[in-house]
Image (tube, rainbow, N blue to C red):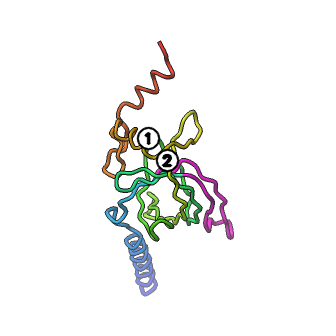
Amino acid sequence: MRRILLCGLSVFAVCVLLSMTVLARTRNAADYPLRVHIFSHSSHSHYENHYLEGVDGDGRANLYENGEPRGFEYSYHCAKRLMNSVGYETYMARWKKPGQTLELLLPAMGDVCELRVDLKEDAYYRHDKHVREEPAAKFKAWMVAHQYDPEHGKNVPVGVFEEEEEVSNPQ
């Protein structure tokens, strides 16, 4: 009877610890007001005893802050793998050290990743599968014309897919 009771208590203790870990890792989305669109990244995975210990690398991304787009190059070290943004989706972020270090909220389990940034005057965009640069003001004009504002939940630009269809299927 004692073994069953001790086993039951052990299982209960493990469940409590796991739930506390999950609660401790939950993040408040309101604490991450910035948006980051990752265009490209390199990665180098580090393993110990066949388990992923961390990933580091560098890449290019856009930061959306106060309605303004701004490109940046970054280096990073994360506990989990970083992924490029899909389509026009963005990651939630906040400044850890303004102008130097961003904390990126990874969607799975509320993990964070630290990006050391080098802000640029231009913004990045993808064209013909290549990442290109243009003046931030020109990219901002595109955002306004297409009602794209990831900071305020407008994550899909209006009219973009129709334009792409016209370019790929000229009549």
Quarter of the image where one finds residue 66: bottom left
In the image, what residue type sits under mark 2? Ala
Q: Mark 1 — residue?
A: 138
Mark 2 or 1: in front is: 1
Q: Start and end of the magenta stretch?
A: 37-60
Q: Decide: few, some or many residues near mark 1? Use Cα within 10 Å; few <14, some 14-19, many ≥20.
A: few
Q: Which mark is residue 123?
A: 2
Whether 40 is among the magenta residues is yes
Residue nearest the observer in this picture, 87 or 64: 64
Compared across the picture, whether 31 is left or right of 97 comes to left
In the image, what residue type sits under mark 1? Lys
- From the top left corner, tell me how far across and down residue 159 is, in percent: 36, 30
Q: From the viewer's perspective, is residue 12 above or below residue 156?
A: below
Q: Earlier in the sequence, mark 2 or mark 1?
A: 2
Q: Are marks 2 and 1 in contact (CB under 8 Å)?
A: yes
Compared across the picture, whether 26 is left or right of 70 comes to left
Whether 97 is among the magenta residues is no
Residue nearest the observer in this picture, 138 or 144: 138
For the point 40% across and 38% down, the residue is 142
Residue nearest the observer in this picture, 72 or 19: 72
For the point 51% across and 64% down, the residue is 113
Q: Quadrant of the N terminus?
A: bottom left
Q: Main secondary structure of the magenta part?
A: strand
For the point 33% across and 44% down, the residue is 154
- From the top left corner, tell me how far across and down residue 69 is, in percent: 42, 50
Quarter of the image where one finds residue 58: bottom right
For the point 52% across and 54% down, the residue is 120
